[in-house]
Structure formats: C-alpha cells, structure tokens
Image (spheres, rainbow, N blue to C red):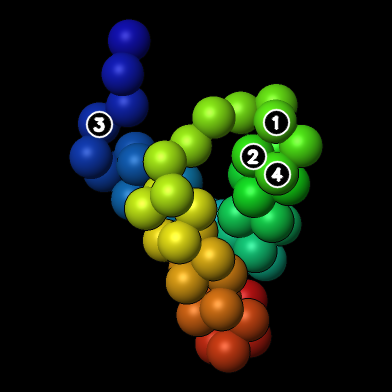
Amino acid sequence: MSLSVADKLLLADLTLTQKYAKELVQSELMEIELGLKEAEDDRVKKLNDLLMVLHKKGY
C-alpha cells in the first residue's frame, strides 16, 4: 500500500512543523557518509542544499 499524494503532503508538513525535517536530512547524509546507504552524488548535493535551506529558514 502506498501513500496518497495528500498523505505525503501531510507528512511533509508535519516534518516541517514539528522541526524534524532537518534531523531527517542530517540522518540521511550521515548514513550515506558512513556507507550504510548508497546515493548518487546528485542526491547528496540536493540533500546538502536542502539542509542549508532548512537551516536558513529556521526549521
């Protein structure tokens, strides 16, 4: 069973309003750095860029 678009948007909103978004991105980057997950360079760059945006916006 996959999530509906509305469910995904609600989940994204919750991660932002509950201040979890930054922690999720940091955790993902750490797992990639430690070799626990594989990721393309483009994904790592996007995650780093997103982390900077979240930091600047105060999330």
Q: Which residue is mark 2?
A: 32
Callout 4 touching callout 1 (CB < 8 Å): yes
Q: Name the amino acid, label 1.
A: Gly
Q: Name the amino acid, label 2.
A: Ile
Q: Name the amino acid, label 3.
A: Ser
Query: Residue 44's x, y, as percent?
Result: 49, 53
Between 52 and 7, which is closer to the camera in this rendering? 52
In the displayed structure image, the side of residue 23 where residue 21 appears, left or right: left
Q: Earlier in the sequence, mark 2 or mark 3?
A: 3
Q: Quadrant of residue 40?
A: top left
Q: Is residue 42 above or below residue 55?
A: above
Q: Which mark is residue 33?
A: 4
Q: Determine whether the residue tagged by mark 4 lies in a helix, strand or loop.
A: helix
Label 3 Cα crowd, 10 Å radius (few <14 / some 14-19 / many 20+): few
Q: CA distance from mark 4 to mark 2?
A: 4 Å
Callout 1 touching callout 2 (CB < 8 Å): yes
Callout 4 touching callout 2 (CB < 8 Å): yes
Q: Determine whether the residue tagged by mark 1 lies in a helix, strand or loop.
A: loop
Give the quadrant of the C terminus: bottom right
Label 2 Cα crowd, 10 Å radius (few <14 / some 14-19 / many 20+): some
Query: Residue 25's x, y, as percent?
Result: 61, 55
Q: Residue at x 32, y 10 (%)?
A: 1
Q: Residue at x 64, y 39 (%)?
A: 32
Q: Quadrant of residue 3?
A: top left
Q: Determine whether the residue tagged by mark 3 lies in a helix, strand or loop.
A: loop
Q: Residue at x 65, y 64 (%)?
A: 22
Q: Which mark is residue 4?
A: 3
Q: Is residue 8 above or below residue 58?
A: above
Q: Which mark is residue 35?
A: 1
* Foreground label between 4 and 3: 4
